[in-house]
Image (spheres, rainbow, N blue to C red):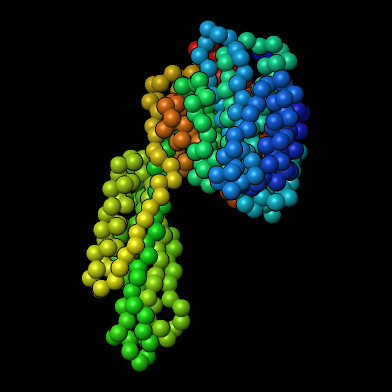
Amino acid sequence: MCNINENRLLALFKKLVETDSPSGAERQVCDILKTELANLNVSVSEDNAGEYINGNAGNLYAYVEGDVDLSPILFSAHMDTVEPAKNKKCIIDDNGKIHSDGSTVLGSDDFAGVCAIIEVLKTVKENNLSHRPIEIIFSVSEENYCKGISQFDFNKVKSKEAYVFDLSGEVGTAAYAAPTILSFKADIIGKSSHAGFAPEQGIHSIKIAAEAILKINCGKIDAETTINIGTINGGTATNIVPDKCSITGEIRSYSDTKAVEQYNNIEKIITETADKFGAVADISFTKNITAYETDVHHKVVERFKNVCNDLQLMPKMERSFGGSDNNVMAQNGINGIVVATAMNECHTLNEWTTVDELKNAAELALNLMISKE
């Protein structure tokens, strides 16, 4: 078995980490990856997703010819990082731990995945390894509810199976399900009046919002569903009965039907509460991503487990309560799982990974690409 080039892998990881790439501003990283793929004689195209999401770069797509007797497989990771992400530093300790300087995130989410895929393409080429046809998507603005890949034209994709390298935790872990994430906003329109001279002439929007919120179940609704009221804003001064109050919240559920049912219930509660006091409620929602669940007996899962066993990694399948590009792929007829790349404490200043686990992620990608199953 060919070994992953550790020094080359770390060099690219450090280069990408130390290149600013917040959501919507992935241009520099996008250009680096285009050059990396071009140097491998891999044809790569960039779409115009950035134009639609107010970004400066699009999604990258590449197709690598392989053994014609095997079906193609899609590998994916995203190019953006969450804030704070300016002037990131990649510090590698003597014990192999990799982290930032503590003032920013590291960006192993998701450069660990990006680097695993790129390094494997290099390993495959330089060792002339037989492999199945490979499709690659490096997406933009994944952290913004997958806005980038939602603009991608899946008509060009040949694969019916995907491995999305974008999960926190130990290599060998993968997510086969993720929830619908639905956000909502309610504007309560009451009536302003002077709070001292004529409070009875007003309709107190904040009190209406508060009463409605008390009627809404928050937290874990059942084993599949959570609801949260995230913000409440209203009023202009202490001596004015507030005529407007806005509530925002989120619903997550492994069942898309349940998510919508919970929204309808919340809409009913807020509307009826507003009506009770003579106010008006303007309520709307956005379904950011839609739930999926890949059958744990599907070939895409079985192949992953077998490769993990071959590499002496302990395969572990789980449901994730966060979204990823795989949610969008599932809506486009692709069966996939989200693969852990040993990024830890993501979306915090304490984010970290290790040299060994970066190599493990690359070894996993390599064996998935060359698998004959």
Residue 33 locus on image (x, y percent)? 69, 32
* Residue 156 visible in image: yes
Residue 233 locus on image (x, y percent)? 44, 69
Q: Is residue 328 left or right of residue 187?
A: right
Rendered position, 368 above or below 338: above
Q: Residue at x 45, y 26 (%)?
A: 334
Q: Residue at x 29, y 85 (%)?
A: 200
Q: Is residue 18 left or right of residue 206?
A: right
Q: Is residue 105 left or right of residue 263?
A: right
For the view shown, which residue lies furthest in the bottom direction?
197
Q: Is residue 303 left or right of residue 129?
A: left
Q: Residue at x 26, y 58 (%)?
A: 268
Residue 361 locus on image (x, y percent)? 61, 28
Rendered position, 284 above or below 75: below
* Residue 367 visible in image: no
Pick the residue in front: 166 or 35. Answer: 35
Pick the residue in front: 236 or 209. Answer: 236
Pick the residue in front: 62 or 85. Answer: 62
Q: Which quadrant: the N terminus?
A: top right
Residue 371 locus on image (x, y percent)? 55, 14
Task: Give the mark count.
Answer: 0
Q: Residue at x 46, y 42 (%)?
A: 322
Rendered position, 185 above or below 22: below
